[in-house]
């Protein structure tokens, strides 16, 4: 059995995945595009050893910052884990929907890519072309390299890819917009308490220009502060704003791309939400 725990940033996917892994004696596979990278811990809200509760976790901390780990790489690695753990229950957890889709569906990539550099186009024009190619594309307008790669990439059979595995459950965690935005804002404050500023300064001082650092919400905003382009409070406000916008894009993507059973999270009694999810899964197994 494969269980996929999805939803917007900050909603509680990590905690739910661990509870389900304990219930079904399963393993957990990361489905967050940025948590595959080493060192980027606080900004990506990477699961801690304490939070793992002894559960085996895969595809965390497998790449160096400079590595260009692609969705095609993720597809190969995730499917290998599925193949090697056929007798186990597997829980995918994360908010990178396209990564999950590439792993579980007949989502094919061509090895051939064009090499158009699009030097004559602005980021906004590139973004518009990407949206025309796929309206659910969720690459940030300022991430020029990823936009160009997306436009150059040739894909096959991506319109209605079929699910490749049996007994797959798509569990979505959600809450009201106001509550989610409050959670996101508080989460950023907690990240600061846990050392986000120090973590960002470490990468800033290394002067590493790579896809991973330029993508993660939290670093690029604080880099503006280090460059004296804004105050610290303005940088934090921008992190919160960008996180809220990202959550909105995640909802849009999952609602359009997958048949998900959504559960409202009861944060004052999380165990009740866990039991609701377990009931749904067990009923589906009968």
Image: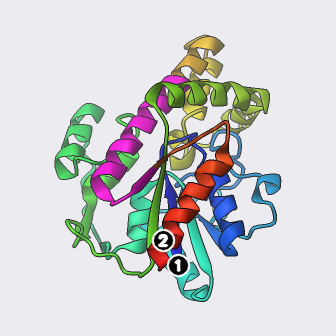
Asked if one can make out residue 253 in the rendered structure from this viewpoint, the answer is: yes
| Residues tagged 1 and 2 counted as in contact (Cβ below 8 A) | no
Identity of the residue drawn at 64% across and 67% down: 28
Q: Is residue 75 visible?
A: no
The nearer-to-camera label among 1 and 2 is 2
Neighbours of disc 2 within 10 Å: few (<14), some (14-19), many (20+) = few
The verdict on residue 252 being magenta is: yes
Q: Nearer the viewer, residue 75 or 250?
A: 250
Left/right of residue 74 with respect to residue 114 in the rendered view: right
Q: Which segment did they paint magenta?
A: 239-262
172 is within the stretch colored magenta: no
Q: Secondary structure at mark 2?
A: helix
**What is the x, y in percent for residue 57?**
69, 67
**Where residue 113 sits in the image (x, y, percent)?**
28, 66
In the rendered image, which residue does mark 2 sit on?
A: 283
Q: Is residue 41 above or below residue 57?
A: above
Answer with left or right where residue 237 lies relative to residue 54. left
The image quarter containing residue 12 is top right
Q: Residues within 10 Å of mark 1 (few under 14, many from 20)?
A: some
- What is the distance, in whole Å, between disc 1 and disc 2 at their CAs? 13 Å
**Residue at 53% in and 41% down:** 9
For disc 1, the marked residue is 1
SS for dot 1 = loop
């Amino acid at each position: 059995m494969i269980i996929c725990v999805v939803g917007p940033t900050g909603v509680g996917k990590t905690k739910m995945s661990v509870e389900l892994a304990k219930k079904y004696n399963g393993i957990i596979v990361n489905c967050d595009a940025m948590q595959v990278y080493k060192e980027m811990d606080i900004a990506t809200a990477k699961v801690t050893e304490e939070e793992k509760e002894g559960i085996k976790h895969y595809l965390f901390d497998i790449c160096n910052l400079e590595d260009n780990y692609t969705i095609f790489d993720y597809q190969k690695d995730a499917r290998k884990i599925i193949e090697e753990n056929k007798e186990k229950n597997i829980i995918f957890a994360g908010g990178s929907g396209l990564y999950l889709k590439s792993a579980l569906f007949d989502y094919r990539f061509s090895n051939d890519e064009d090499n158009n550099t699009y030097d004559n186009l602005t980021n906004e024009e590139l973004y518009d072309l990407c949206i025309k190619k796929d309206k659910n594309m969720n690459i940030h307008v300022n991430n020029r390299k990823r936009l160009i790669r997306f436009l150059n990439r040739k894909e096959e059979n991506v319109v209605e890819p079929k699910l490749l595995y049996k007994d797959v459950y798509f569990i979505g965690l959600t809450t009201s917009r106001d509550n989610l935005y409050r959670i996101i804002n508080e989460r950023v404050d907690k990240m600061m308490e846990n050392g986000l500023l120090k973590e960002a300064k470490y990468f800033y001082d290394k002067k590493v220009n790579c896809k991973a650092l330029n993508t993660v919400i939290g670093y690029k905003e604080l880099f503006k502060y280090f460059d004296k382009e804004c105050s610290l409070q303005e940088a934090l406000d921008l992190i919160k704003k960008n996180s809220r916008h990202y959550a909105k894009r995640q909802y849009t993507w999952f609602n359009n791309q997958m048949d998900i059973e959504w559960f409202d999270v009861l944060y004052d009694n999380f165990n009740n939400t866990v039991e609701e999810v377990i009931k749904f899964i067990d009923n589906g197994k009968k």
